[in-house]
Amino acid sequence: MNETVIKIEALFSQKGEEAYFGEAVTQAAHALQSAQLATEEGAPPTLIAAALLHDIGHLFHPEDLADSGIDGQHEEQGAAWLSAYFPASVTEPIRLHVPAKRYLCAVEPGYLAGLSPASVKSLALQGGPFTPDEVVAFEQNPHFEAAVRLRHWDDTAKVVGLEVAPLGNYLPLLLSLAS
Ligand code: FE
């Protein structure tokens, strides 16, 4: 089995049962629900992988980051680590999933009101809703539509007790994408 996929499995088993910050579901449940929503919507394999791995930056141990020389926010950390092994169609929506929240707050009526309290709280730390200029710039990014789709799954994947397919179901997909 590919070394990267082994590492992803290990991160899920070591840290996946930790709480997803301020929410009532675990990190693993949140990741698997995100991937399931992507699958149900018929998203391409790269975007299903992005949904599954979008918060992997929250699962790193401090030593993983020191080893990789990575510093920054969880979306940047996750994308930076994954970019050594996965294509941009996986890693860029991950890198952009926080900007996508700031984007949606600016352009989608009712979006901000529908966010969870924890998500509203982190929004302020992340810079708040985009300005009109930032909206225009974000829409130029070739991965912006994928990031917005991922963001909607991210916001929805917080259902307590939902039955989901296990991580093992996604390993063939990850293996097919990892180099
Ligand atoms: Fe998330």
Image (cartoon, helix red, strand yellow):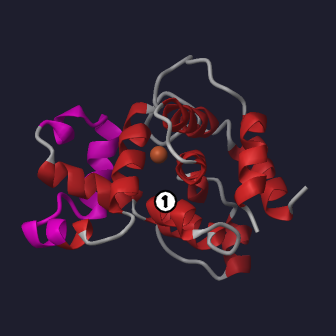
Residue type (three-letter) at the residue carrying disc 1: Ile
Residue where numbered disc 1 is placed: 94
The C terminus lies in quadrant: bottom right
Please tell me whether residue 130 is drawn above or below residue 108 in the rendered image: below
Instruction: Residue 137: give x, y in percent of width and height.
Output: 21, 73
Please tell me whether residue 77 is drawn above or below residue 103 in the rendered image: below
Instruction: Residue 148: give x, y in percent of width and height.
Output: 33, 51
Other-residue count near label 1 (Cα within 10 Å), few / some / many at <14 / 14–19 / ≥20: many
Q: Quadrant of residue 134?
A: bottom left
**Does residue 80 appear in the picture of this structure?**
yes
- Of residues 113 and 23, the one nearer the viewer is 113
Q: Quadrant of residue 58?
A: bottom right
- Of residues 173 and 63, the one nearer the viewer is 173
Residue at 68% in and 75% down: 84
Residue 115 included in the magenta stretch of the image: yes
Q: Does 69 sit left or right of 6 as displayed?
A: left
Instruction: Residue 1: give x, y in percent of width and height.
Output: 91, 55
Residue 83 included in the magenta stretch of the image: no
**Does residue 14 appear in the picture of this structure?**
no
Instruction: Residue 163: give x, y in percent of width and height.
Output: 61, 18
Magenta segment's dominant SS is helix
Secondary element at image label 1: helix
Outermost residue, bottom side: 69
Q: Which residues are magenta?
A: 110-136
